[in-house]
Image (spheres, helix red, strand yellow):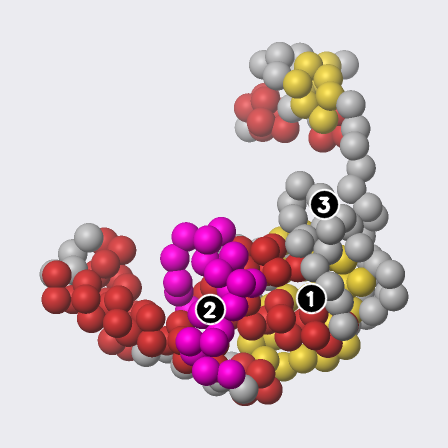
Amino acid sequence: MNVEEVLNREDFKRCLAFHGHLCPGVSIGYRAARAAMEYLAAQRAEDEEMVAVVETDACSADAVQVLTGCTFGKGNFIYRDYGKMVLTLLSRKTGEGVRVAMKPDAFAPDPEHLALIQKVTCGEASEEERARFHRRHTRRSHDVLVMPTEALFKIEAARVDLPPRARIAPSEACAACGEPTMATKMEAVEGRKLCRDCFRGVTG
């Protein structure tokens, strides 16, 4: 499959629409999610039948949510702050899981690209540098979309305990700020129930 074919896929268009722009991260998340779902022969989750665990909160996580149907609101999208391009996808139906981890040499840093990112982010890039950044950013995004899966990722079966299904708990007013708070997320201090924000303020 060439770049144009991938860019014209409806599932990839949905990822771009959700994320807002094309970048290497969303391309990586797209490829990882597709690889995981193909491994499990899984369809997009309509409810909680799958669980996705991501180890970064970067751009790739958006594509994972769109393709897998796992979301924070359904309680089946879990974020672990490890700073890794890793996706673990689990099926509640079969109990099977797969871990898709980016290979160390799959997306080697490009010094010029990194320098341009820094300039653009800081607002110090000239028009010519912005144009160069856009071209290089787009090319690297496209490269990810057509790389062989085995060159991008290490894929292996995952044996992970499935988290419990999402629970709905009643809310109570925080004794300090008065805002409705899920009762199971409150902290007790001197006989009063506080939201965690107020609890931090009291305990320092």
Res 203 seen here: no
Residue 154 horizontal/vertical position (percent): 63, 81
* Cα gap from disc 2 to disc 1, whole angstroms: 27 Å
Q: Residue at x 26, y 62 (%)?
A: 118
Q: In the picture shown, does residue 8 fall above or below 70?
A: below
Residue highlighted by disc 2: 8
Q: Dots 3 and 1: beta carbons under 8 Å? A: no
Q: Residue at x 26, y 72 (%)?
A: 135
Q: Quadrant of residue 107?
A: bottom left
Residue highlighted by disc 1: 88
Q: Residue at x 76, y 58 (%)?
A: 50
- Looking at the rendered structure, the kind of residue marked 1 is Thr
Which mark sits nearer the N-terminus, 2 or 1? 2
Tell which of 150 and 113 is nearer to you: 150
- Looking at the rendered structure, the kind of residue marked 3 is Gly
Residue highlighted by disc 3: 75
Residue 189 falls inside the magenta stretch: no
Tell me the quadrant of the picture where the C terminus can be found: top right
Q: Residue at x 43, y 78 (%)?
A: 3
What's the magenta region? 1-24
Q: Secondary structure at mark 1?
A: strand
Relative placement, left or right, of 140 versus 26 is left
Which mark sits nearer the N-terminus, 3 or 1? 3
* Cα gap from disc 2 to disc 3, whole angstroms: 31 Å
